[in-house]
Amino acid sequence: EEYFKKAMSIWSPYHDRARIKFANVAYVLSDKDLALLAIDEIKKSAFNHPKDFSYPLTLGNLYTSTEDYSSAYKKYGRAIELSPKRQVVYFQFASAKFLAGEDEEARNTLRQAVELNPEVGEPHWRLGLGLIDGDNEEAIEEAKKAIILGYNPLKTEEIDAFASIYINKKNWDRLVSFYEFLVEFKARDKIGTADTYAQLAATYLQAGQKEKARDAAIMAAELDPNLKEATELFIKTLD
């Protein structure tokens, strides 16, 4: 904070860039004091660049981190006015609404992001995540659409969130189908696919399909040699 203030006290053509970087750090750290300082600074850049959507977007994020959702909504709305087809704004707007407990409004915002370009995978994935515990079947369908369209989920916990829909109900057959779908479309991501094969192997075992469990475990180890030892232990439990 001290160095940032010092930097802002010295004239530089890079102030706007420095403010954005500082604001992003404040947002990620969820530090209210830093966020309030960043808000004051980003307002200056927003005044200097009234047609640039990135400043109201950044302000929306900062207000969200301070739980001032009313102000955040106004800034996200302004960002959408300036760049109505920028999907990232809708993603952030929806996140703020979820945090504020306005789940249905958040889902509607994510649907808007999907409608902007239905052929892009990520909005479908985010909508799917947002639908979990709302409409679980639609959540799974949106996840599948995202992957078919080429979206490659990088966060294991997000995949686990979809899997939990079936795990909680001990619906192993449907979970098997979900993991089989994932490995079919994630072949381009070697390590990620290895992890999914490992999950598939465990699910086959739960479903009573030991031979398929063995095959999936072997495939996981072939894709990622780091899984070899765990695979050998897993196969021993099948005998």
Image (tube, rainbow, N blue to C red):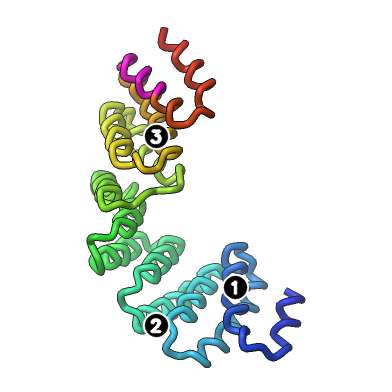
Q: Which residue is drawn at 62% across and 73% down?
A: 22
Which residue is at 71% across, 77% downward?
4
Secondary structure under badge 1? Answer: helix
Tell whether label 1 touches label 3 (CB within 8 Å). Answer: no
Residue flagged by tag 2: what amino acid is it? Arg
Which range is magenta?
209-218
Query: Mark 2 and 1 residues: CB-CB less than 8 Å, in contact?
Result: no
Secondary element under disc 3, as helix, strand or loop, is helix
Quadrant into which the C terminus falls: top left
* Mark 3 Cα-neighbour bin, 10 Å: few <14, some 14–19, many ≥20: many
User: Which one is nearer the viewer's eye here, 133 or 181?
Assistant: 181
On-image quarter of the N terminus: bottom right
Residue plotted at (55% across, 68% down): 65
Q: Is residue 221 magenta?
A: no
Badge 3 amino acid: Thr
- Location of residue 148 in the rendering, given as x and y in whole percent from the top left corner: 25, 48
In the picture, the disc for residue 78 is: 2
Comparing labels 3 and 2, the label whose residue is closer to the camera: 3
Q: Is residue 40 left or right of residue 210?
A: right
Give me the C-alpha separation between circle 2 and circle 1: 21 Å
Give residue 57's position: percent from left, percent from top.
46, 76
Question: Who comes first in sequence, dot 3 or dot 2?
Answer: 2
User: What mark, if any, has residue 196 been given in the picture?
Assistant: 3
Q: Which mark is residue 178?
A: none
Residue at mark 3 to residue at mark 1: CA–CA distance:
35 Å
Local crowd at mark 2 within 10 Å, few (<14), some, or many (≥20)?
A: some
